[in-house]
Amino acid sequence: MVRAYIFIEAIKARDLKVEEEIVTLPGVKQADVVTGRFDVIAMVEVEELGALWELVDKIQALPPVVKTTTNVVVKR
């Protein structure tokens, strides 16, 4: 099991819409609109690293998403 946090920068007026779309994607356990440098942070869990990159590709394909940064959890 691979767990990661995906930090998402989005077009400001669409932050809430991005969170609503992201939380419906398989593997996304939680997505929150936040303050600071990023607009949304998603916590995801997938079976393997390849599935993580597929999920990141789906998130990056959403029209309001400008940029993502992914941090993989190495120890819980």
Image (cartoon, rainbow, N blue to C red):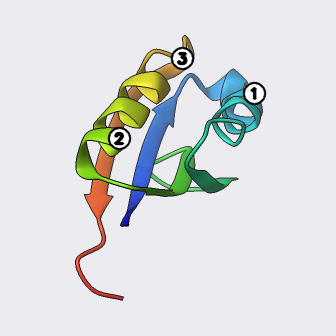
Residue 34: which disc? none
Q: Which of marks 3 and 1 is nearer the N terminus?
A: 1
Query: How far apart are labels 3 and 1 at the CA level?
Result: 10 Å
From the top left corner, tell me how far across and down residue 30 is, in percent: 66, 58
Residue 76 can be seen, yes or no: yes
Image coords of residue 16 (percent x, y): 76, 35
Callout 2 crowding tier (Cα within 10 Å): few <14, some 14–19, many ≥20 = some
Residue 52, horizontal then vertical, whole percent? 34, 44
Q: Are marks 3 and 1 in contact (CB under 8 Å)?
A: no
Q: Image point 30% across, 53% down: which residue?
A: 48
Q: Mark 3, residues whose alpha carbon is within 10 Å: few (<14), some, or many (≥20)?
A: few
Question: Mark 1 sits on what residue?
Answer: 17
**Labels 1 and 2: the sequence-earlier one:** 1
Report the disc number at residue 62.
Answer: 3
* Nearer to me, 67 or 75: 75
| Label 1 SS | helix
Q: What residue type is labelled 2?
A: Ala
In contact (CB < 8 Å): disc 3 and disc 2: no
Viewer-proximal residue, 41 or 47? Answer: 47
Give the residue at x 57% y 46%: 40
Q: Earlier in the sequence, mark 3 or mark 2?
A: 2
Q: Nearer the viewer, residue 59 or 14?
A: 59
In depth, the one of 6 and 12 nearer the eye is 6
Residue at which label 2 appears: 51
Q: Is the N terminus in the top left, top right, bottom left or bottom right quadrant?
A: bottom left
Point 42% across, 50% down: residue: 6
- What residue sits 35% from the left and 41% below the top? 51
Q: How far apart are marks 1 and 2 (CA)?
A: 24 Å
Comparing marks 3 and 1, which lies closer to the viewer? 3
Number of disc labels: 3
